Image (cartoon, rainbow, N blue to C red):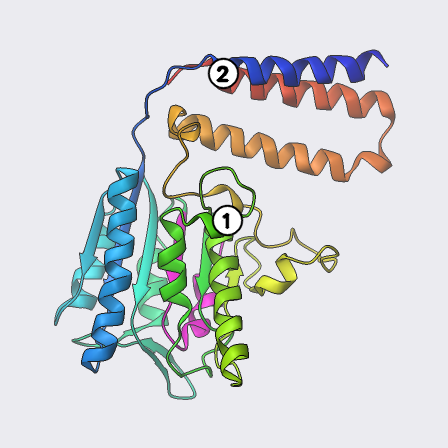
Amino acid sequence: MMKDRIALKSWATLCLIMACMQLHAAPRALEVVIVVGASGTEEYGKKFQTQVTAWTNACTKASVPAKIIRGEKTTEDLAQTLATADATHSLWLVLIGHGTFDGRDAKFNAEGPDLDVKQLAGWLKPLKQEIAVIHTASSSGGFLKALSGKGRIVITSTKSPDEVFYARFGEHFAEAIGGLPEADLDQDKQVSLLEAFRHASKTVALFYENEGRLATEHALLEDNGDGIGTRSEVLASDTPPATATALDGERAAQLVLVLSPEEQQLTDTQRTTRDALERELKTLKEQRAKMKEDDYYTQLEAILLKLGAVYETKS
């Protein structure tokens, strides 16, 4: 029908506009803060440093500033860093180290005073920008609910604070986030937070399976604000469970550190607008069965034209 043809024409126009865009990278409004905890042993110290190097290399590749916090004043320095964070920039907070749980409070082991969940939640509360927390220490699951909220993506290496043994999840996440081809599930030449999460989760599961050992870590991702994390195998399922809120992973799938050449041509504002429109489009498609056909195609055309306008504005 006519509206169907209009929608298809809009998509064709969109693709043409993308192909004609200027080929230069736009600046990023993103800051990455990497917190390194106490290693305890030389072996773990090397493992943590390997992760730090992977993250800093990825940030350099992405032209995104990375601040590393470690040492006796870790908690003090982190509090100051968050208090002075640029409100116009998104923030990714990466925690690398060990964690503990005393049956009441989950903590991140710093070289100086440990960092507990109440402290971190309190420091993040005033911040209004979008924040991703990638907590890769053991017992990190104890941080998830307190750090969740609107505009937050929280990834933890464990499903609960009771998983207290060393977590390998962070090693594989750090390896993937820089653009590891094996982690690029949709083959778009970049690795999103969701893809890094799924890659690391799968690699960890295979490790325990190959070793014939009971897994002592089960990573979670939470990005819909309900405070309940989701395991990777659920997100990968062809028939995800019905939930009262949107399934986790939708926003994490849109956030990328090292952008593809095509994505580099867009500004952060363009990407943010595009991402919101894509979520709106997804919602519309999910509601199609309940809508009149004319209403569906009218709304579809409007969204597609807005998407085209996003790409029409050159960076």
To which residue does mark 1 refer? 252
- Closer to us: mark 2 or mark 1? 2
The kind of residue on which mark 1 rests is Ala
Please, which residue is most extreme toward the front here?
A: 210
Residue drawn at x 85%, y 37% is: 289
| Element assignment for label 2 | helix
The quarter of the rendered structure image containing the C terminus is top left
The image shows residue 69, relative to residue 264, as above or below, that is below
Tell me if mark 2 has few (under 14), some (14-19) or many (20+) residues whose alpha carbon lies within 10 angstroms of its own: few
Q: Is residue 275 visible?
A: yes
Residue drawn at x 44%, y 74% is: 142
Q: Position of residue 304 (x, y in %)?
A: 64, 21
Q: Earlier in the sequence, mark 2 or mark 1?
A: 2
The image shows residue 201, relative to residue 163, as above or below, that is above
Q: Nearer the viewer, residue 185 or 165?
A: 185
Per the model, the C-alpha gap separating discs 2 and 1 is 26 Å
Give the quarter of the image for residue 47. Answer: bottom left
264 magenta-colored? no
141 magenta-colored? yes
Please give left or right for residue 84 compared with residue 99 in the image: left
The image shows residue 308, relative to residue 86, as above or below, that is above
Q: Position of residue 99 (x, y in %)?
A: 34, 78
Q: Position of residue 187 (x, y in %)?
A: 53, 41
Tell me the magenta residue range.
Answer: 131-149
Please give left or right for residue 244 compared with residue 230 in the image: right
The kind of residue on which mark 2 rests is Ala
Residue drawn at x 41%, y 34% is: 260
Please, which residue is most extreme toward the left here?
A: 72
Q: Which mark is residue 19?
A: 2
